[in-house]
Image (cartoon, rainbow, N blue to C red):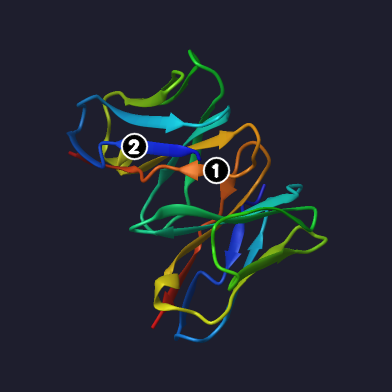
Amino acid sequence: KAGVTQTPRYLIKTRGQQVTLSCSPISGHRSVSWYQQTPGQGLQFLFEYFSETQRNKGNFPGRFSGRQFSNSRSEMNVSTLELGDSALYLCASGGVVRYFGPGTRLTVL
Amino acid sequence: EDQVTQSPEALRLQEGESSSLNCSYTVSGLRGLFWYRQDPGKGPEFLFTLYSAGEEKEKERLKATLTKKESFLHITAPKPEDSATYLCAVRETSGSRLTFGEGTQLTVNP
């Protein structure tokens, strides 16, 4: 069974730009959640989607948004990038147990 | 608000030297406590889920235990390949998000 896949694996952007990250969950999983990981803050919850509906949202500004498609694939978007958005963005799928993807390393210059 | 505190922040062991990692938590109602292992540049890898006080789970050299206030990850006779950051997370009964601790960075020297 294939695991969670995330694309792209690495991104370099400049301040003010926007970025879209993609996540394909494990086959059969309808829940997808997103986390931001930084050295100072650790893993912070961004949001969770279930069957195309946002079920929960963390304490991040409105520049961070997401969506889920009918095939359970999910995207997250960050607009007007700031230097502090540099992080590893992790996607997880699953119900009780969350299985994580390899992450997308975003660097904002 | 859920809180998870892990200690120590970093731990260096010699190969074969057993030790324990601690995860203290505060939640209004525990729906599950999770242990993950994370290698540099990779996503967290699921290890264990514990649900109630007194529960224990084992996998190879790792054993996780749970009380009402904390969880321990015991590492018996570790090997260099056990070197990683170990993350603890909790899920409360009324929510679906995981709240993570900062992790313990374990280094096992040969």
Co-location on one chain, circles 1 and 2 = yes
A96 relative position to A16: left or right = right
Residue A19 position in % (x across, y down):
57, 78
Q: Which chain carries label 1?
A: B
**What secondary structure is found at the residue carrying circle 1?**
loop
A64 relative position to B34: left or right = right
Residue labelled with disc 2: B6
Q: Which chain carries label 2?
A: B
| Residue furthest top as drawn | B54
Residue labelled with disc 1: B98
Quadrant of the snapshot with the C terminus of chain A: bottom left
Q: What residue type is labelled 2?
A: Gln
Residue B30 position in % (x across, y down):
56, 28
Query: Which residue occupies the foreground of this view, A48 or B76?
Result: A48
Q: How crowded is mark 1: few (under 14 residues within 10 Å), some or many (20 or more)?
A: many
Residue B5 seen in the current view = yes
Q: Distance between the residues labelled 1 and 2?
A: 15 Å
Residue B7 in the image: above or below residue A60: above
Residue B51 position in % (x across, y down):
56, 23
